[in-house]
Amino acid sequence: MVGWPLLLLLAEVNAFYLPGVAPTEYLDGNRVELKVNKLTSVKTQLPYRYYVLPYCPPKEIHVSAENLGEILMGDSIENSLYDVRMKANVSCALLCDRTLGEEEKAVFKRMIDHEYQVNWLVDNLPAAMKYQKTSTGAMSYTNGFPVGLKIDGSYFVHNHIQIGLYYHSNAEEFEGSRVVGFEVYPLSILQQSSDGSLQCGDMDDPVPRFDLMKENKITYSYDVVWISSPIRWASRWDNYLKMHEGQIHWFSIVNSLMIVLFLSGMVAMILLRTLHRDIAKYNDMDADDSAEETGWKLVHGDVFRKPPHSKALAVSVGSGVQLLVCSCVTLVFSAIGFLSPVHRGSILQGMLLLFTFAGILAGYTSARFYKMWKGEDWKKTTLLTAFLYPGTVFCIFFVLDLFIWGTKSSGAVPFTTMFALLVLWFGISVPLVFLGAFFGYKKAPISLPVRTNQIPRQVPAQPWYITGTFSCLVGGVLPFAGVFTELFFIMSSIWQHQFYYLFGFLMLVLVILVVTCAEISITLAYFQLTNEDYNWWWRSFFTSASSALYVFGYSCLYYFTRMQIGHYVGALLYFGYMFVISYTFALITGAIGFSATFFFVRTIYGSIKID
């Protein structure tokens, strides 16, 4: 078991060997396969297969073995005609010639207008373009390269690619060489054929030459340059990881820690001063027995009264616990390298499998609380636990997939994959939910420290600032404030097609989120009980869950300030998936707040003597 010190070290994003990934050694002259992946655009969010453009397809196109995560992400990894061999430099090599008709030109124009990026792979490394940051002057990398450029109404296609490959050799450790870097530099040029050989002209001239609308034939060519590098194979992903600013992440952590310290101080003040004084006063046997009870002890006969819509609350808490455990385990495996961007689609596939098997926890949790409330409709509760959250997400996913099918995008999930998801859901997850519910109902009910009166006590009029809506909206601000900086990087990873690899940071943020949700729910529940309002069940859930409203609001702000989606299907995808993310966030945070408040309330009422 990896200890916490190691997980903290991973936040530094230093190089480490990824378990399950074996390096490949190439002897001099061995073929190094260059594979092509989907075309992606930030403006449409709709990926397409590489060969929808009039490039140079092989006679037989082979699609690489894909996992479930790759298919759901729309990856389409295929072979290519590029002949790349270890340490063999190539200059102005001809790939193929293609004739351009009006239809081919129209496809190129559409792709250039929507700023589509070409994605290649060599030895599992994605192609990257090096550029210089204007603010700091430091060199950084961006994923892929653009299909072409639009300048003053003219369209220029990148028909010549300079490929820079870095290799590392160490005769003492292994035979051959390993690929440790993959850079590309695209050019738009007019090649000339002379004496049977191709002439690419002055490639140092950055001015684009191949005007799509003036030419009816396109020639594709490429250069290959091999460069020796001291970078070891285990460190070859470092350049991709430097796309993020570590200082901003540390600012995120410090910001979140300050919020936690503030909340922890409030909770400590309640527990050590106010609550301790209250319990000592209530337990003072020398006090006048006829003295009128005040504060939270006054509602001891109603504090554990069955909440309205208890079935929905049990289902929500059960699903939230399932999602929380799934998220924690996924983060742990990601931080130690088993699930990472190196394994394309592995994180998404791992989350799906973990969610499926965590169904037993959802069934168990919902059953335990529903039995505590003496609910009788256990079958419906278990069915809702198994189908409500997964069913909502699947329906949204299916409707969005129909829209993607209409655009003929490679992001459309095949119906065979849909069937595989249904098998995971109905064949594994649902039975596990019922199994967990069986164990939950079989156990004795959760013991409560006080009895519930038969006649409910009337709740006195409450000040406006303690009402449910206002306190829940205020309570949601702090959990959101603890995560919003990191949320920016996660959204950039999803929607701007950037790598996210700082799982050490993300684990710390998750711990901070759990502590924040627990403390804010406990604090506001205590203030509510001291005002003799015992209806705390749902409010403890919504106090933390309301932070999802701020997450969705932030996603709307991100859309209008950072995104440039010009296609209605892309906008539907964005808001559809952000709604799913916000819904998931609400269940996780709500379950944390509810569980923490329940144990707090049970503890304090178990600490006093009730006549």
Image (cartoon, rainbow, N blue to C red):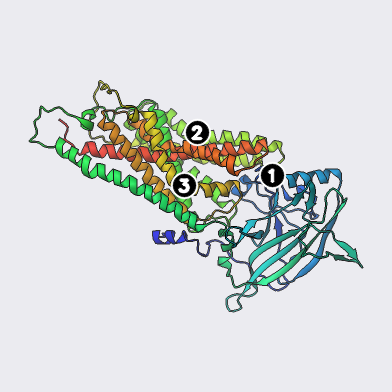
- Secondary element under disc 1, as helix, strand or loop, is loop
Q: Is residue 422 visible?
A: no
Location of residue 392 in the rendering, given as x and y in whole percent from the top left corner: 53, 33
Cα separation between marks 2 and 1: 29 Å
Residue beneath label 3, please? 327
Q: Considering depth in this image, is 123 or 290 the residue closer to the camera?
A: 290
Q: Is residue 450 left or right of residue 61?
A: left
Location of residue 276 in the rendering, given as x and y in whole percent from the top left corner: 20, 42
Residue at the (47%, 61%) spot, across then down: 12
Cα separation between marks 1 and 3: 28 Å
- Secondary element under disc 3, as helix, strand or loop, is helix
Disc 1 residue type (three-letter) = Ser
Q: Is residue 585 visible?
A: yes
Above or below, 429 against 177 in this view is above
Above or below, 409 against 252 in this view is above
Mark toward the start of the polypeptide (2 vs 1): 2
Q: Is residue 424 left or right of residue 6?
A: right
Tell me which corner region of the image, top left, top right, bottom left or bottom right, holds residue 141.
Answer: bottom right
Residue 466's tag is none
Residue beneath label 2, please? 387
User: Dots 1 and 3: beta carbons under 8 Å?
Assistant: no
> How many other residues sit within 10 Å of disc 1, few (<14), some (14-19) or many (≥20)?
many
Disc 2 residue type (three-letter) = Phe
Residue at the (61%, 58%) spot, across then down: 134
Tell me which corner region of the image, top left, top right, bottom left or bottom right, holds residue 158.
Answer: bottom right
Location of residue 265 in the rendering, given as x and y in whole percent from the top left corner: 30, 47
Mark toward the start of the polypeptide (1 vs 3): 3
Residue beneath label 1, please? 410
Q: Is residue 443 left or right of residue 118?
A: left
Quarter of the figure that contains the N terminus: bottom left
